[in-house]
Image (cartoon, helix red, strand yellow):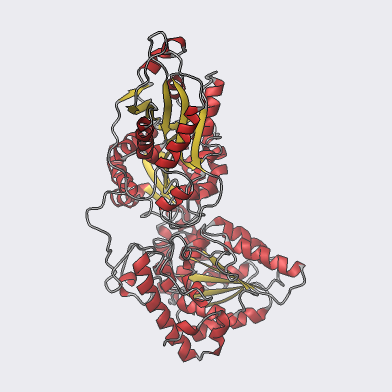
């Protein structure tokens, strides 16, 4: 029996010798590679924090001392050391979450999966302890994987440094990477601290490094070259942080338990805010991860635990992200004005292929979605067309900038939202279910939801032709569905696609065609679901027309006209139903005086746990069977159908 099964809480660690801690670290790495290879998850970040997490829990007393991870994907070791060693259901329904979870353990303080928030949490917790007379309690914020590139972290540091008596330890897990190598001034500074150079060698390195930053970088080099004290402060490890008024300890080898415990012990005894700078290697101890240049196995699917090779079935359908990545390459060849912006996620959002062909036309701002959005408005002002590619859930952080920096200034910026809708295994913070409800209130903004690869390409081109307002494309995680052809398009070139007509509308008492029963408005990836709902309704004698609005916000006038020819409108969307496409459709019909009821089907407003996409959708009632049953009950209570000729807008309705 090894050491790991004997660890049921952090206190068990304190009886171990240093030699046993090293042995335990090896066991933890073996466990992580074996278990995460089976389930998928964030492997590289956790391999890099094994010794660091051990040292923290041997030095501090969790949960009395609060430990916050930023981002929370580096908390797997923490879970193991706090009594959670069944990883068989990691990120699966009923199993462990991929991030800290208060429902799992008292040791988990923050479900911290959006980066750069830990220092604000830590500041608030430390203040709360002090105000309640609990001065002996410490707060430890572990911030890494690029999270220090986020502006929110620096806003918090400004306050932390001013509270000289707060027992707060900031552990900078410096592995030089987020998903890919971390960029920006802060990253350059930490990279400097990683090395020891002679005076002249440092000058040569600094000149080359800063020169890559263009004119600002050259100015910075001139300043440093001419100011010996400035150069000394830049080289000295403590310079940056102690200028903020914080004690600095380090750099420390993040894989040396003794050195880490010594540094953390000093920080704990200091009695005020301290930064401990630990240098770690992402993917440490697993050669396949250490040699992976893309992202050091930041997040993996099911892999071979020996070779690191993916075990995903060959010939899988292309993902939405891959389709977008390929189309951006084609766009880049046609249009020199298009530039890409990423927030430290070049590969995950599919801009890496565009960057390979056009390296000068991609900007990585670090984990800073607000900055990315406003910078895009600036680029648009100069006549370029920026494409800001982010996960749907991360655009939540930049809503104010979308509203007031982009939309107010009528900037032609295209936002591409990957992982929109229910995403599955990453849990409540990563479901992209809020974007449509948030963006629906932005004046002038137009939002498209492609239903397949072909419409993604088509709608991206249409978005890039808009130069006086923000445009948005949103698509799901995973494989793009097979092509869903349209029967016809109504409402013009950028109008609404009619996908299917099922059942028979019959005739009224005067022999005229009667209203069809249900107009099904399918949003994006829910088009196949909507078609299945229509087939189920037809089996019960209920006729339906299925349409894809393509541009779902604002509501197209063709949707309003089509609604006149139906007894009920059903909207099916993979976002929260409050304030989304269904709500906007209801409002549009009311504004047009169309008295057709609307049944809004979407994600109920709550935080949905992790699980497969199918499991979460089923729990939310978003299956064809559930939807069809509800619609059939609704149709049964409607007044009889009217002849088509007695309704406004009949010519268009008859085409449905």
- Counting from the top left corner in percent of width and height, residue 327 is at 30, 42
- Counting from the top left corner in percent of width and height, residue 162 is at 69, 65
Q: Is residue 151 left or right of residue 467?
A: right
Instruction: Kindly identify the residue that appears in the image at 49 percent across and 90 percent down.
Output: 18
Up-down: is 114 above or below 309?
A: above
**Furthest residue in direction left, as rendered:** 315
> Quadrant location of the C terminus?
top left
Q: Is residue 404 left or right of residue 210?
A: right
Name the quadrant containing residue 533.
top left
- Counting from the top left corner in percent of width and height, residue 418 is at 41, 47
Up-down: is 272 above or below 312?
A: below
Up-down: is 111 above or below 586?
A: below
Q: Is residue 106 left or right of residue 2?
A: right
Considering depth in this image, is 499 or 237 the residue closer to the camera?
Answer: 499
- Counting from the top left corner in percent of width and height, residue 228 is at 54, 70
Considering depth in this image, is 396 or 530 the residue closer to the camera?
Answer: 530
Instruction: Kindly identify the residue that appears in the image at 55 percent across and 90 percent down.
Output: 15
> Quadrant location of the N terminus?
bottom left
Residue 555 visible in the shown view: no
């Amino acid at each position: 029996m090894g050491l790991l099964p004997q660890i049921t809480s952090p206190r068990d660690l304190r009886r171990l010798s240093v030699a046993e801690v090293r042995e335990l670290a090896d066991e933890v790495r073996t466990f992580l590679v074996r278990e995460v290879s089976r389930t998928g998850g964030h492997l590289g970040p956790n391999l890099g924090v094994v010794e660091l997490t051990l040292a923290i829990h041997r030095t501090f007393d969790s949960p009395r001392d609060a430990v916050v991870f930023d981002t929370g994907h580096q908390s797997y070791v923490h879970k193991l050391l706090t009594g959670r060693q069944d990883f068989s259901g990691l990120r699966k329904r009923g199993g462990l979450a991929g991030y800290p979870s208060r429902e799992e353990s008292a040791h988990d303080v923050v479900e911290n999966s959006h980066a750069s928030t830990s220092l604000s949490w830590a500041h608030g917790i430390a203040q709360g302890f002090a105000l309640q007379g609990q001065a002996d309690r410490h707060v430890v914020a572990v911030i890494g994987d690029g999270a220090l590139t986020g502006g929110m972290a620096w806003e918090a540091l400004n306050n932390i440094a001013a509270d000289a008596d707060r027992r707060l330890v900031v552990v900078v897990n410096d592995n030089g990477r987020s998903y890919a190598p971390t960029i920006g001034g802060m990253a350059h500074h930490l990279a400097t601290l990683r090395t020891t150079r002679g005076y002249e060698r440092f000058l040569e390195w600094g000149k080359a490094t800063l020169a890559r930053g263009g004119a600002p970088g050259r100015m910075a080099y001139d300043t440093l070259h001419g100011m010996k004290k400035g150069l000394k402060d830049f080289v000295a490890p403590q310079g940056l942080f102690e200028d903020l008024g914080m004690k600095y300890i380090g750099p420390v080898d993040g894989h040396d338990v003794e050195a880490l415990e010594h540094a953390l012990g000093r920080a704990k005894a200091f009695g005020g805010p301290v930064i401990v700078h630990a240098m770690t290697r992402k993917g440490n101890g697993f050669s396949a991860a250490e040699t992976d240049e893309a992202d050091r196995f930041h997040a993996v699917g099911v892999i071979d635990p020996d070779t690191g090779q993916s075990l995903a079935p060959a010939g899988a359908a292309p993902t939405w992200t891959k389709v977008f990545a390929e189309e951006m390459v084609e766009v880049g060849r046609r249009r020199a004005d298009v530039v890409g912006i990423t927030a430290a996620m070049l590969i995950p959002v599919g801009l890496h292929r565009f960057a390979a062909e056009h390296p000068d036309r991609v900007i990585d701002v670090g984990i800073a979605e607000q900055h990315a959005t406003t910078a895009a408005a600036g680029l648009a002002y100069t006549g370029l067309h920026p494409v800001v590619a982010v996960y749907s859930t991360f655009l939540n952080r930049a809503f104010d900038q979308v509203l007031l920096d982009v939309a107010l200034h009528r900037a032609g910026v295209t936002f591409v939202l990957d992982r929109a809708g229910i995403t599955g295994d990453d849990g409540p913070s990563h479901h992209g279910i809020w974007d449509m409800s948030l963006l629906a209130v932005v004046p002038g903004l137009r939002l498209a939801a492609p239903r397949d690869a072909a419409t993604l390409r088509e709608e991206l081109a249409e978005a890039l032709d808009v130069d006086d307002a923000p445009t948005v494309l949103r698509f799901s995680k995973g494989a793009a569905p097979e092509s869903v052809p349209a029967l016809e398009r109504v409402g013009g070139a950028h109008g609404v696609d009619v996908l299917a007509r099922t059942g028979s509308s019959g005739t009224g008492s005067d022999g005229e065609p009667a209203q069809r029963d249900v107009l099904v408005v399918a949003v994006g990836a829910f088009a196949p679901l909507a078609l299945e709902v229509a087939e189920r309704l037809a089996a019960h004698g209920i006729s339906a027309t299925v349409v894809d609005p393509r541009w779902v916000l604002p509501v197209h006038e063709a949707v309003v006209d089509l609604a006149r020819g139906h007894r009920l409108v059903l909207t099916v969307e993979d976002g929260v139903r409050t304030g989304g496409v269904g709500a906007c459709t209801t409002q549009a019909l009311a504004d047009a005086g169309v008295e057709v009821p609307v049944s809004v089907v979407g994600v109920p407003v709550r935080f949905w746990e992790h699980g497969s996409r199918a499991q979460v959708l089923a729990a939310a009632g978003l299956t064809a069977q559930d939807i069809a049953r509800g619609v059939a009950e609704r149709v049964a209570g409607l007044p009889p159908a009217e002849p088509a000729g007695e309704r406004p807008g009949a010519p268009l309705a008859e085409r449905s």
